[in-house]
Amino acid sequence: EVQLVDSGGGLVQPGGSLKLSCAASGFTFTDSAIHWVRQASGKGLEWVGRIRSKPNNYATTYAASVRGRFTISRDNSKNTAYLLMNSLKTEDTAVYYCTRHEILGPPGDNWGQGTLVTVSS
Amino acid sequence: EIVLTQSPGTLSLSPGEGATLSCRASQSVSSSYLAWFQQKPGQAPRLLIYGASNRATGIPDRFSGSGSGTDFTLTISRLEPEDFAVYYCQQYGSSPLTFGGGTKVEIK
C-alpha cells in the first residue's frame, strides 16, 4: 500500500526555520517526484515546489512566493523527502501536504495527511 | 505562470442532479496535463481526473473530464451525497504548477 506521512509542523516565530518530513512507503521512491502543497485556513491549494525523480536528476523547482527561502531535498536511503523552510513569514501559516508523482503515472494519486505550520509571535 | 480560473465559485445543487465545473487557463496547457481534485473538510485532496479525461483508480464513472488547450470541464453526471465538496483543477504541464481557486459544490 502506498503511504505518505507528513510530520514536523509546529509553531515558529517570524524569521524562524522549520523542517518538514515526508516519509514514503509502498512504492519505488526514486521513481517518483515529491511535491509540497500548502493550504491556508479556509483558502485554496497552493503549490510550493517539487523534487523530481531519479531519471530527472532530482531537479528542484519552487513557487515564486517561497523561492530562496524554502529548500526541498530527499534522502533516498530513508525514503524520505524534506521541506526546509527559512525566513518564515506569517503568510506561510498553512497546512502543508506532500504528494507524489510517479514517472509516467498520474500526478497526486497519493497525499500525506498534512502537517500544520503556524508562524506567529 | 499559467493562471487557472474556475467557475462558478459555488454550485448549489440537489442530490441526483448533474454538475458542470469549468476551468479556464490563461495559456494553453501542455499536452492536456490537467488534473481535477476533490477535497472534503479536514481531508487531503483526492485525485479524480488526470490528463484532462482519465479517471484515477477507483473513481466512479459518474465523474468525467474533458477539454484541451485552455478550456476544461469536470462533469458529475448524478450527484451522490458524498460528492458535495470543493473541486480544484491543477495544471502540471509547465512550471510552476498551479491550481485553480476551487469550486464548492454544496447541497441546495
Image: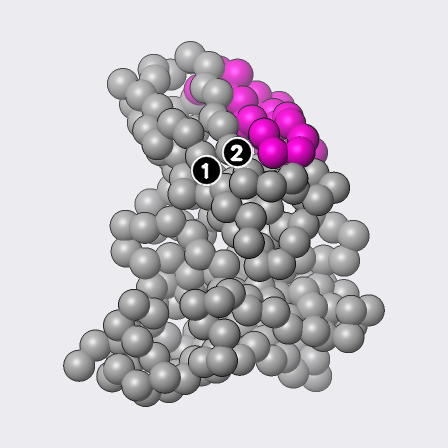
Report the front residue among A120 and A74: A120
* Left or right of B43, for residue A32: right
At mark 1, the secondary structure is strand
Check disc 1 and give the amino acid type. Answer: Thr
Residue at x 44%, y 56% (from the top left corner): A46
Report the front residue among A54 and B30: B30
Chain of the residue where label 2 is placed in the rendered structure: B
Q: Is residue B85 magenta?
A: no
Residue B87 drawn above or below residue A29:
above
Residue at x 54%, y 40% (from the top left corner): B26
Instruction: Please identify the quarter of the rendering in which residue B81 is found.
Output: top left
Instruction: Please identify the quarter of the rendering in which residue A54 is found.
Output: bottom right
Q: Are marks 2 and 1 in contact (CB under 8 Å)?
A: yes
C-alpha gap between disc 2 and disc 1: 5 Å
Residue A120: x percent and y percent?
A: 21, 77
How many numbered circles does the render carry? 2
Q: Where does the magenta region start and end? A: B51-79
Q: Quadrant of the C terminus of chain B?
A: top left
Residue A24: x percent and y percent?
A: 61, 69
Check disc 2 and give the amino acid type. Answer: Arg
Q: Which mark is residue B24?
A: 2
The tag earlier along the polypeptide, 2 or 1, is 1
Q: Is residue A107 visible?
A: no
Residue A104 drawn above or below residue A18:
above
At mark 2, the secondary structure is strand
Q: Which mark is residue A104?
A: none
Q: Which residue is mark 1?
A: B5
Label 1 neighbourhood size at 10 Å, few (<14), some (14-19), many (20+)? many
